[in-house]
Amino acid sequence: MIMKYSWILFDLDNTIYDFDASSDFALRKTFNEFDINDNEENIEKYKEINRQCWMDFEKGLLDFQTVRNIRFELFVQKLNLNIDPIEMTGRYLQLLSNTDFEIDGARDILDFLKPYYKMAVVTNGLKEVKRPQLSRPGIASYFAEIVISEEVGIAKPHNGFFEHTFERIGRPSKSKVIIIGDNLHSDIKGGKDYGIDTCWFNLKSRANDTEIRPTYEIGALAELKGILG
């Protein structure tokens, strides 16, 4: 097989692992344990706060420790609850780290690509969640490198994250590397700004109303066979 790339960088959440399913499971269980109604209104309130915190983090407005702790602090304040948000945070992250929901077709495409490509995980996230998830038998064995933003001290889409990643993978030619991820800002813009090809995994068929244009766009991981195979 003729290979255009030598390295594939895979985002983790909602690209390999189904973060939405994992978060929903851990969040509902946390709510139940703290006697909070796990209705859709409360779930969405937390998710709105979580999305905004991670967006602020990617802009450099929040650091890792603040993102870790502030989400439930804001949630508890919003609902005027008499609950320790730090305790909630610890329990939620513990539950989240023990989830192993995968995106449909993830294992199949990794099996297909492994004989031909070197692969790395590049993920924005907390090491206390990502390391346990990746320590389970199976997924981690596909990847030569695992790069977690908290351990690096900087996150996608910043060039420093990609510089660190390229140092870890032996500084191949940028023309021989592609990043695959679901986030137009952190994965696609980050990859484009660094000068590598990008593949937007648009699982939910979202409209792209930004100026960010990926090299490729797919709606299912199996479509990578047509690009990389």
Image (tube, rainbow, N blue to C red):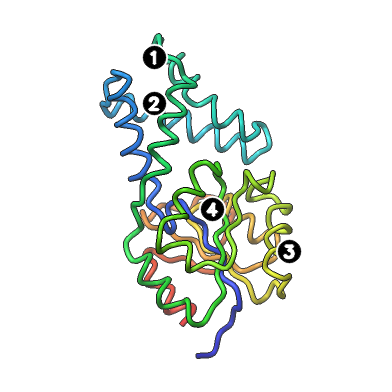
Q: Residue at x 52, y 41 (%)?
A: 128
Q: CA distance from mark 3 to mark 4?
A: 24 Å
Q: Is residue 57 found left or right of 71 in the rendered image?
A: right
Callout 2–callout 1 Cβ contact below 8 Å:
yes
Q: In the structure shown, which secondary structural element does the residue marked by tag 2 occupy?
A: helix
N-terminal-most mark, 1 or 3: 1
What residue did someone put label 1 on? 79
Q: In this rendering, which labeled residue sits more in front, label 3 or label 4? A: 3
Q: Residue at x 54, y 78 (%)?
A: 117
Callout 4–callout 1 Cβ contact below 8 Å:
no
Q: Nearer the viewer, residue 199 or 121?
A: 121
Q: In the structure shown, which secondary structural element does the residue marked by tag 3 occupy?
A: helix
N-terminal-most mark, 4 or 1: 1
What residue did someone put label 3 on? 167
Q: CA distance from mark 1 to mark 3?
A: 45 Å
The disc labelled 1 sits on which kind of residue?
Answer: Leu
Mark carried by residue 192 = none
